Amino acid sequence: MIYKIKMNKDDYFKISNKIISSNLCINDEEVTFEIEGGSYNILKRTNYEFKIIESLRSKILRFFSRYGLLLTGVLFLASLLYMNIYRVSRVEFNRQTPINASIEYRIKSSYKRLLCFDFCSLNYKEFSKEMQKTYFEYPFINVTCKNNVISVYIANVDEVQYQVDVALEGNIVAKKDGVVDIFYVYSGKSQVSKNKYVKEGDILIEGTQTVRGMVLATTYDKVELEIPKKETIEQLTDEISNYHDITLFGWNFSIGKKQSFELSYKNETPVFNLFDFFSMKKIAETKKNAIIKTYSENTALELAEKRIKDDFTAHQSNALEKIIAITNTKKEETEDSYKFTFIVKKYESIGSFSLKE
């Protein structure tokens, strides 16, 4: 540590040969100079009077030398408390709906991994508004975070109490032809009635200041599917390789990996992440086998119907929607495939948001 000293000029020159000083400045009968710790201890053992002049730098150094460890601990604790505001442990829904998985995926896509924890910096109010715009069929969607748990509230279609805090200035129009069965209007003016036939583009709910609602109708779709007589598919086996993947300053290497698979599915679980400089993931790698499957006309027909059902489920927006019937109207066999034509009768939400022109 460097000390800045002021003392009598005559006294200084009497002991100047015993100490190492720098930045000497003579002002009348006084001198100022700087010395390090060893010379300072020699000066203290003399009987000459002197005064320590502390500069801002020396004050800061002295403060940190005394309280640096305590300050570091306080800053570390404050950092933990601050980060805890954004730490999340899980996502909870008030009830099961077909849109839960989509909303949860959107939330978890914003996660950042630090150390052993997940952090989320979403603006929950704005995210709630975005979800209300995306899923206007529901009266109200609200996302909040408390005690490190993200809670998603999705109001039921028959709930009376709801609060809309986002404006959707437009109309809800029909995205396909159908016969209206039931409808829920949360805001706006209904343009439909039970058993009314509507065409694609017709206004179902006219917006006033805002528009929200759901119209369920019976619809008919013509679906054509081609199923190959023979195809190669990848099938998971029971053979699993568990190991850890380490990333250090951009370099990747694995720990505990005993075998490699030509085809595999990797399930990655983050374990530790330090600002992406050092991270660790737990990997469960499941072996896949390439299998050649052949289909008869009956098995091809079953597969085609399954694909129709899977596609419907993937695009389902509420639990009231369902497939009523799948009718095969035409079959055609070629050298390499089967071609099927279906009429699919569905009970589904037919509304689509459209801005006013």
Image (cartoon, rainbow, N blue to C red):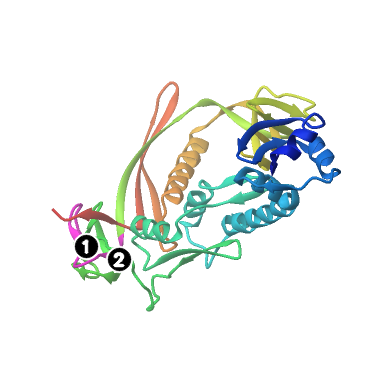
Identified at 70% across, 33% down, the residue is 285
Residue closest to the eye, 224 or 137: 137
Question: Which residue is denoted by mark 2 in the rendering?
Answer: 213
Residue 204 is labelled as 1
Which residue, as the protein is rendered here, is positioned at the far left?
357
The magenta stretch is: 198-217
Q: Are marks 1 and 2 in contact (CB under 8 Å)?
A: yes
Classify mark 2: helix, strand or loop: strand
Question: Can residue 260 be seen at all in this image of the molecule?
Answer: yes
Q: Position of residue 45 (x, y in %)?
A: 86, 43
Looking at numbered disc 1 in the image, what kind of residue is underneath it? Leu
Looking at numbered disc 2 in the image, what kind of residue is underneath it? Gly
Q: Position of residue 271 (x, y in %)?
A: 70, 43
Residue 163 is labelled as none
Which residue, as the protein is rendered here, is positioned at the far right?
45
Q: In the figure, 182 relative to 134: above or below?
A: below
